[in-house]
Image (cartoon, rainbow, N blue to C red):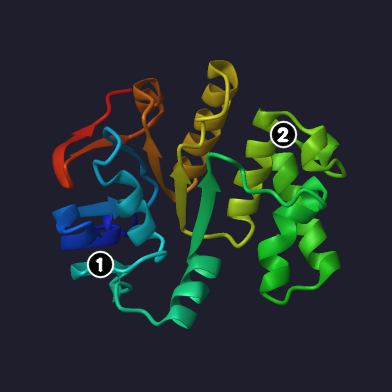
């Protein structure tokens, strides 16, 4: 098996429970799956199916109640809070529906934030941030603040920010949810290009039209995998 074919993420019998009043709800119910490097995977399902819970576990934003989650062969389900923070900073790039940009910072400064948190100097961080803004087609907006950008431009800034630590895993939570169809398609094509460079991209979405940009579609329902299909080009 080549390195490209080896799973970067492996889940085995993962369970996540929540209490709602007097009832226990299994948000994820013995989920097992693997994610390969260089794969663009969409996770589809109705509200309450467990999509966001799964994404949070993949990004070490939460811990499973039972089961195993390994990243490149190392268990991440039981990391300490400090280890989780280091994992999120260095191994995962997050892209959110509402962009989560800091309004007082320029586009390049927003992109550079993870580097600054890691102790990188401002000059070095700026150089890489500008490179990534050029990559996502936004170099001419580098010195604009979020209020001066369109929704699509803000999401491109968010994509660049997700890439600045060169993470092998990109997690996208409804990345086209606040965009028109044309702009959303451009963001999806960009995520597909990122996956083709060797990053693993996992996207939660309600948008079935987004699936055609992906390599794989996983359907969740009531916390269980209902289907796991390769997407035909």
The residue mark sitting in front, 1 or 2, is: 1
The quarter in which the C terminus is drawn is top left
Q: Is residue 190 left or right of residue 215?
A: right
Q: Position of residue 224 (x, y in %)?
A: 14, 46
Please, is residue 83 above or below residue 113 in the view? below
- Residue in view at x 77 percent, y 40 percent: 146
- Residue in view at x 16 percent, y 42 percent: 222
Q: Position of residue 98 (x, y in %)?
A: 58, 40
Name the residue that disc number 2 marks. Answer: 137
Label 1: state its secondary structure: loop
Per the rendering, the mark at residue 64 is 1
Residue sitting at the far front: 22
* Residue 32 seen in the current view: no
- Residue in view at x 13 percent, y 54 percent: 29
Q: Is residue 137 left or right of residue 184?
A: right
The quarter in which the N terminus is drawn is bottom left
Per the rendering, the mark at residue 166 is none
- Residue in view at x 45 percent, y 43 percent: 173
Q: Is residue 73 left or right of residue 122?
A: left
């Amino acid at each position: 098996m080549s390195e490209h074919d080896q799973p970067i993420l492996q889940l085995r019998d993962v369970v996540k429970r929540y209490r709602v009043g007097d009832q226990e709800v299994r948000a994820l119910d013995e989920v097992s799956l693997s994610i390969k490097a260089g794969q663009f995977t969409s996770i589809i399902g109705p509200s309450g199916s467990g999509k966001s819970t799964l994404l949070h576990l993949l990004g070490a934003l939460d811990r499973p109640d039972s089961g195993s989650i390994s990243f490149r062969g190392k268990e991440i389900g039981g990391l300490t809070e400090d280890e989780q923070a280091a994992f999120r900073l260095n191994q995962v790039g997050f892209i959110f529906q509402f962009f989560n940009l800091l309004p007082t910072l320029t586009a390049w400064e927003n992109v550079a934030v993870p580097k600054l948190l890691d102790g990188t100097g401002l000059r070095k961080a700026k150089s890489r941030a500008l490179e990534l803004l050029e990559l996502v087609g936004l170099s001419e907006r580098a010195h604009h603040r979020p209020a001066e950008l369109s929704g699509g431009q803000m999401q491109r800034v968010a994509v660049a920010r997700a890439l600045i630590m060169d993470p092998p895993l990109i997690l996208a939570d409804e990345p086209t949810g606040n965009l028109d169809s044309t702009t959303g398609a451009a963001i999806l094509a960009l995520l597909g290009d990122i996956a083709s460079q060797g990053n693993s991209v996992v996207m939660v979405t309600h948008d079935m039209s987004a699936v055609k940009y992906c390599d794989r579609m996983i359907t969740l329902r009531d916390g269980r995998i209902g289907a796991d299909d390769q997407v035909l080009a």
